[in-house]
Amino acid sequence: MSPSLPGSFLFCDTMPCYQPYPRSLRFPVPLSFRLFCVLILMMVPHVGMAQHSPSPSSHTAFPAPFFTSAPVVRFATYLGGSQDELAGGIAMDEDGNVYVAGTTFSEDFPIQSSMHPHQGGGIFGTDIYVAKLSPTGEVLYATFLGGTGDEFVSDITVDATGHAYVVGGTNSDDFPMVDSLQGYRGGPLLHSDGFLAKLSPDGSSLLFSTYLGGTGEEGINGVALDPEGNIYLVGGTNSFDFPTTAGAFQPHFSSRGVFGFDAFVAKLGVDEMGNYAFAYATLLGGSGDEVGARIATDPEGHAYVTGYTNSLDFPLRDPIQPDLAGPDDDDFSGDVFVTAFSPDGSFLTLSTYLGGEAAEQSAGLTVDGQGDIYVMGWTTSTSFPTTPGVLQPTNEGGTDGFVARLVRSGGSVWSLGYATYLGGTGFDETYGGIMVDDEGRAFVAGITDIEPFPASSPIVEAYGGGLTDAFLLQLDADASQVTYATLLGGNAFEGISGVAANASGRVCITGGTESADLETHNAVQDRFGSTPGDPESGGDAFVACFSESLVATEDAPGAPIDFALHQNFPNPFNPDTEIRFDVKVPGHVVLKVYNVLGQEVRTLVNAEYAAGYHRVAFDARGLASGVYVYRIEMGDFEAEKHMVLLR
């Protein structure tokens, strides 16, 4: 197993046990994680694993769905510069604003209102990007975040007031720290510590950040919040001195596995002054290897975590499956674990294996209002424990996704409400994430190389033709049928890293693509930023959002509900930018640009426009650097915004 690049950060394309991935699905991860194929998927959940991939036309289809009406696509856009972007996670607030975070190799990533306007770089030139998009896809901010080393991002969440919380790993000694609980990186040169960063609602400042780790290597893979503002973290560590707290469930490192990793779980409480402190920090594992993948909470402060284990002695509590089903002597096989902690982190309220005779990996977890747990991921097992009456009770071949619902039937008694495979005879993985609505319907995201796929989307009607496409589907409450499914893909590769939903029923996904022909809609960036076909150029991130309830209205799909003028993008710019505006009803539109003296410098639009979303390019060649005002008139509607030309 030879590295593709020198040093501690290596790429996933050199694993001899699995097929190489397109560059957009690779991710720089610490050397110790890189050595363990299964653990890599937890450190970077959007990286997939395929054993072999015959041509898509040779595959049989996903289980046939029962379709409802096609959804309204609010927007679908690229997001990236001229090099690689690797999506890490997505979140959404109740207003429908979308928050995405990932890793970028691009110095020209389209930043806007940035607290860090320049990429920090590192041996591999990676930095974090964090962006906030409006419900219509307008970029509200986009910023770099990082030090002079390399960073990777695993997850993002957002609170009720619009603060974004980003987690991952960094080997930068100068990662920006604000009121940190651990102000130094504990690992050796080029090894990563976990990081947590909290951004202001406008993305202009860092309000809190900290390292988390010992003298080995760590990555934080999941983050969640409870209604009180407490922060919950999950990840993996091989540090014997990982900083646990007094009274924690498992204060001492236990792994004696080949790669020597334990999972960890931490809760940060906030006092009346808004200062953070550890409520608890605990390890979780047996004598084998573990890594925590995702975390969720409930209003009472219980933490629910999932991840990977190959330990025969993983700590259990009232298990649904009391024994490890995968072989413990196989470094690359194991089971999923699902574990729940008490609010103070001192004991378990549930802990169980979940898996079959081969390999499983979890990649998503959520908890509904009844306290039921939903977990999803992928499996190569033919004996994964499915339940009667589900959509797909058997593995159709190779790698299939799985979705399971764990139900508490009273006291400490848990059972499988349902468990189903999800896939065909090709390569299918549900590692993008899972969300559940008030009716118990699960939205699941992942990738597939199956054609035909049961898609009913205004974005695409068929498989895109590349190695993989992203998918989003909705299962009914008992997982007996698919009520909605769509593909998003072009002629190259797509991966997926997250799904988010809010109470109004809007659903958004993010991932990575190497397709220059991805179908966009109302996009802030409708062109592929990297060079198509250039393996060194890599891929872009993408973001796609679907309407409330995934059901179309009687109006045209995506028709504006009001007139609007959006902020130009990019901004600042040189010399080209794009201005978008929404026309509620057909009419005459005038859009002009003025300098700060109020003098008109350009007329961009003076014509009749149909109802819909529109855009116009502005080429500022010949104009001096400075602030400009663009003003629109549409009937009684008038609006103006400022933009900055920097030469």
Image (cartoon, rainbow, N blue to C red):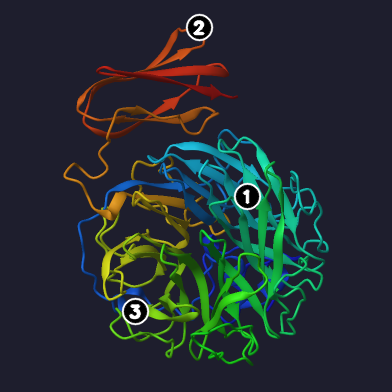
Q: Mark 2 points at which residue?
A: 597
- Bin the neighbour count of mark 1 within 10 Å (Cα to Cα): few under 14, some 14-19, many 20 and up: many
Horizontal side of residue 110 vs 414, given as left or right: right
Above or below: residue 51 compared with residue 265: below
Name which of mark 3 and mark 1 comes first in the sequence.
Answer: 1
Label 3's element? loop
Label 1's element? strand
How far apart are the alpha carbons under marks 3 and 1? 35 Å
Q: Where is residue 339 in the image (x, y as percent from the top left)?
A: 56, 75
Of residues 124 and 292, the one drawn nearer to the viewer in this rendering:
292
Name which of mark 1 and mark 2 comes first in the sequence.
Answer: 1
Q: Residue at x 25, y 39 (%)?
A: 559
Of residues 403 and 47, the one drawn nearer to the viewer in this rendering:
403
- Bin the neighbour count of mark 2 within 10 Å (Cα to Cα): few under 14, some 14-19, many 20 and up: few
- Residue type for callout 3: Gly
**Res 32 seen here:** yes
- Bin the neighbour count of mark 3 within 10 Å (Cα to Cα): few under 14, some 14-19, many 20 and up: many
Label 2's element? loop
Horizontal side of residue 494 vs 13, given as left or right: left
- Residue type for callout 1: Ile
Q: Where is residue 369 in the image (x, y as percent from the top left)?
A: 41, 62
**Res 528 seen here:** no
How far apart are the alpha carbons under marks 2 and 3? 63 Å
Which picture quadrant has residue 263? Answer: bottom right
The numbered mark at residue 424 is: 3
Q: Mark 1 points at which residue?
A: 128
Of residues 345 and 489, the one drawn nearer to the viewer in this rendering:
345
